[in-house]
Amino acid sequence: MRRKIIKQGNNSYTLTLPIKWIRQLNLDKESELEIEESQHKLTLTPSGKQKRIEKATEFHFTKKEFNIPGLKHRHVQRVIAAAYKAGFDSIKITTDHPPVLDYIEKRINYFMGIEVVDRGENYCLIKNLVAGLDEEFDTVFRRAFLITNRIGKESLELIKRNKHKELTNLNSLEQTNNKITDFCKKLLAVKDYKEPKKTKYIYALTAENERLVDEFKYIFDYLAENKIHLTKNTVKLYELITKEIENFNSGFYKFSMEQVYELSKNREEINTLAKQLFFKVDNKEKLVIHHLMNISVKIYEMGEAYLEMILSDKS
């Protein structure tokens, strides 16, 4: 989009704003904007609390869509999750198959801040009930990383004690992490982070954190089901990776180039050990190493996003 600068008097210049943007943020002639200057760029942000226009959407599910073989009704949850993370405040579901509505009632607890507020014979209405919680974004965002750290530490202790069956008890933490990270993505879809240019980095960190915890869940389920005893060096690899997560968390709010260096150095140590192990352990244990390496990659990518976010302050 391009706008022409208009000269007003001797020392003033004005610029018209897109009407679509004005209406979307419910602005008027009395509204004020915060202007952030960064080299050749200006960022405009409405000051104070603006009344946001409610976003609504609607979906229809048939019996055929509900019973896709092998998916266990997850198609329905996937669609609702996408609408939730896209920032919709109102989601209406219609169906010709009432079990769809029963399923939604059970699964709605997997999402933070929304509830089924109305239900009829062939429909239900899901509403966002916590529109103001975006003011606490940093607290919620931080909690997701603390849960990730906890999952790593507690699972390591269980693995050291060969209590593999108890690992699946940590899956409730994985579900909590999913709820929190999905909620963070929803808030970022509705409104930029308090420092707008950091929004894309915060979103990337949130999404990568969720995927990282998924890798832990795959390990827990696999070990509990197959009763595999991990060799000493694989446990050492697990410990190095959980330590890497702990280091990332502890350094998130006190950045230093030393921390970036340590992340790079530790990743090299992890990679070297993983490659050595991959050709020594039996095939069943290789899958665990594969998931551990996926976690290592995600930590490193989170470190990159974090470094870019910090450096964006200096640009």
Image (tube, rainbow, N blue to C red):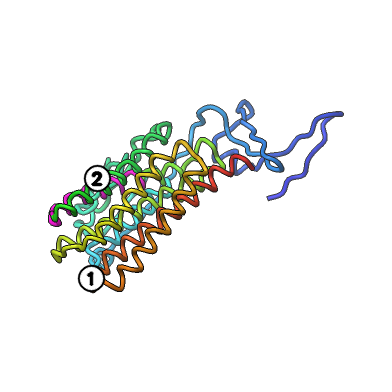
In the rendered structure, which amino acid carries the disc numbered 1? Pro
The rendered magenta stretch, by its main secondary structure, is classed as helix
Q: CA distance from mark 1 to mark 2?
A: 24 Å
Residue 167 falls within the magenta-colored stretch: yes
| Residue drawn at the location 70% of the way across and 41% of the way down | 39
What SS does tag 2 mark? helix
Q: Which residues are magenta?
A: 163-182
Q: Residue 8 has which mark?
A: none
Q: Secondary structure at mark 1?
A: loop
Q: Is residue 104 above or below residue 6?
A: below
Is 138 above or below relative to 165?
above
Q: Position of residue 145 (x, y in %)?
A: 35, 43
Image coords of residue 138 (percent x, y): 42, 35
Q: Kindly identify which residue carries mark 1.
A: 69
Amino acid bearing label 2: Asn
- Residue 50 shown left or right of residue 239 in the figure: right
